[in-house]
């Protein structure tokens, strides 16, 4: 009897232990099998891009994601925007995987910061990260000691992030102070490697992520389960797409130029203000984009000044000299528009600059030609439009009389004295609603006129 009681007690204990273990395993599995979110980063990484990535990170944390995979394929990077967000990635509550892809992609300075802060750093074949210019933005007006302190601060942060994940840190000092590019092959062959995974595509990446354990902020360890799992893509909403478009340096540049051309058109050919309204809207869009970029405002002023010079050439007889100067200022200002010390590899596309310069030159030349052609054209309306026309004498000029021209009778005075009714005269001037006329000088002209009559 006693033995049976011990047996049941022992069985109950094991059942409770098994149930407790099963519930713990189920809870752990549920927490680790949350959704796998992906987010793609392209173009120049600005504060607008960072706002979108912050939303994606919050969504992944709220959804208790298995992982957030950030795919990088960009060149330009605004340095003041990426470093704070890299700190957020390092402290994320879910595993963060940064993946430079597809093949041939470049991650620039953003890649150096985000790969360092990620729990798992991955690259596709034939990809690079880093930049040929320093990763730290340092004002040249600062003392050398202060500059070194700033360089050391950035280097130390990158080393801490990489060392925490067991990755190589030998490349960091050179990248921060002088600039450095690393390919996926170079990063993988360092000892220890500077990246954790080299994967050809997303499917291979998910396979290689299976079973990896990462330690999150606070010491919590999470095992990633990705095998056979589908991913959920986080995409920008309409407002974010609009802001990302405006923050593109080439788009902002084109909006500025198109806005200036619209205002220029309104000033050359005044109308109901449609072109002026369009120009103001385009210029506002350009300014929104420029506020997201480290632009040289003196170059922005140079672009506007260039259009002022081209506009003045329409009204000032410079024979095209102001247009040539304006186009030269336009070219130089376009090439120096972005401060590349603050935003490595960020620039206005060369094709856009050349297109704008050529089209502006053609547009200005056409406008100047139209203005001068219009000035030389005889006035076709009003009293002045009668000058040079032929008139028939209806009441004898002695020297005053009446002539018929353009379907109306006019008082006229003859320069040649008396002219009989029925003869033809030519209008030479208009004074106080009276025409000044003279007799036709050649018989041939008279014959031709009578033939027309």
Image (tube, rainbow, N blue to C red):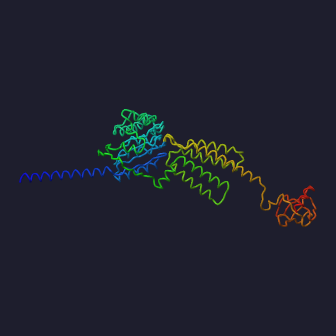
Q: In front: 268, or 67?
A: 67
In which quadrant is the C terminus drawn? bottom right
Outermost left residue: 1
User: Foreground residue, 356 or 206?
Assistant: 206
Please state the horizontal and vertical placement of residue 397, each as a whole percent of the image: 91, 64
Residue beneath the point at 87% across and 65% down = 403
**Nearer the observer, 34 or 351:** 34
Numbered disc total: 0
Quadrant location of the N terminus in the rendered image:
bottom left
Q: Position of residue 366 (x, y in %)?
A: 69, 49
Report the front residue among 179 and 166: 166
Left or right of 105, for residue 417: right
Residue 92 % position (x, y): 35, 47
Work out whether 391 lies above or below 312.
below
| Residue 415 placement (x, y as % from top left) | 90, 59
Q: Residue at x 15, y 52 (%)?
A: 13
């Amino acid at each position: 009897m006693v033995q049976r009681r011990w047996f049941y007690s022992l069985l109950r204990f094991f059942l409770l232990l098994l149930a407790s273990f099963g519930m713990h395993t189920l809870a752990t599995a549920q927490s680790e099998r949350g959704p796998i979110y992906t987010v793609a980063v392209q173009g120049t990484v600005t504060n607008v891009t960072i706002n979108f990535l912050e939303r994606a990170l919050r969504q992944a944390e709220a959804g208790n994601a298995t992982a957030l995979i950030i795919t990088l394929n960009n060149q330009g990077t605004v340095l003041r925007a990426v470093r704070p967000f890299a700190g957020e990635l390092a402290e994320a509550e879910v595993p963060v995987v940064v993946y430079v892809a597809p093949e041939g992609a470049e991650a620039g300075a953003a890649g150096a910061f985000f790969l360092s802060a990620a729990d798992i750093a991955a690259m596709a074949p034939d990809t690079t990260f880093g930049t040929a210019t320093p990763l730290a933005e340092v004002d040249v007006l600062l003392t050398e000691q202060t500059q070194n302190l700033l360089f050391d601060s950035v280097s130390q942060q990158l080393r801490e992030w990489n060392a925490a994940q067991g990755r190589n840190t030998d490349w960091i000092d050179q990248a921060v102070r002088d600039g450095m590019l690393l390919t996926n092959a170079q990063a993988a062959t360092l000892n220890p490697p500077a990246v954790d995974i080299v994967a050809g595509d997303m499917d291979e990446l998910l396979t290689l992520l299976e079973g990896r354990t990462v330690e999150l902020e606070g010491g919590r360890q999470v095992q990633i389960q990705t095998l056979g799992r589908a991913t959920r893509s986080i995409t920008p909403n309409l407002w974010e797409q609009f802001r990302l478009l405006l923050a593109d340096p080439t788009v902002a540049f084109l909006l500025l130029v198109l806005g200036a051309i619209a205002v220029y058109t309104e000033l050359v050919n005044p109308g109901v203000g449609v072109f002026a309204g369009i120009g103001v809207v385009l210029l506002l869009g350009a300014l929104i984009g420029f506020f997201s970029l480290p632009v040289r405002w003196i170059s922005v002023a140079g672009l506007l000044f260039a259009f002022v010079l081209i506009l003045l050439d329409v009204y000032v007889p410079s024979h095209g000299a102001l247009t040539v100067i304006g186009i030269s200022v336009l070219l130089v200002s376009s090439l120096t528009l972005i401060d590349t010390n603050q935003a490595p590899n960020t620039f206005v596309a060369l094709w856009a600059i050349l297109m704008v310069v050529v089209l502006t030159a053609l547009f200005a030349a056409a406008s100047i030609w139209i203005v001068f052609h219009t000035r030389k054209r005889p006035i076709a309306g009003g009293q002045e439009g009668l000058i040079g026309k032929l008139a028939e004498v209806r009441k004898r000029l002695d020297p005053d009389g009446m002539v018929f021209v353009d379907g109306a009778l006019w008082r006229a005075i003859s320069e040649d004295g008396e002219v009989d009714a029925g003869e033809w005269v030519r209008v030479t001037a208009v004074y106080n609603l009276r025409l000044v006329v003279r007799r036709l000088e050649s018989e041939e002209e008279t014959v031709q006129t009578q033939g027309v009559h």
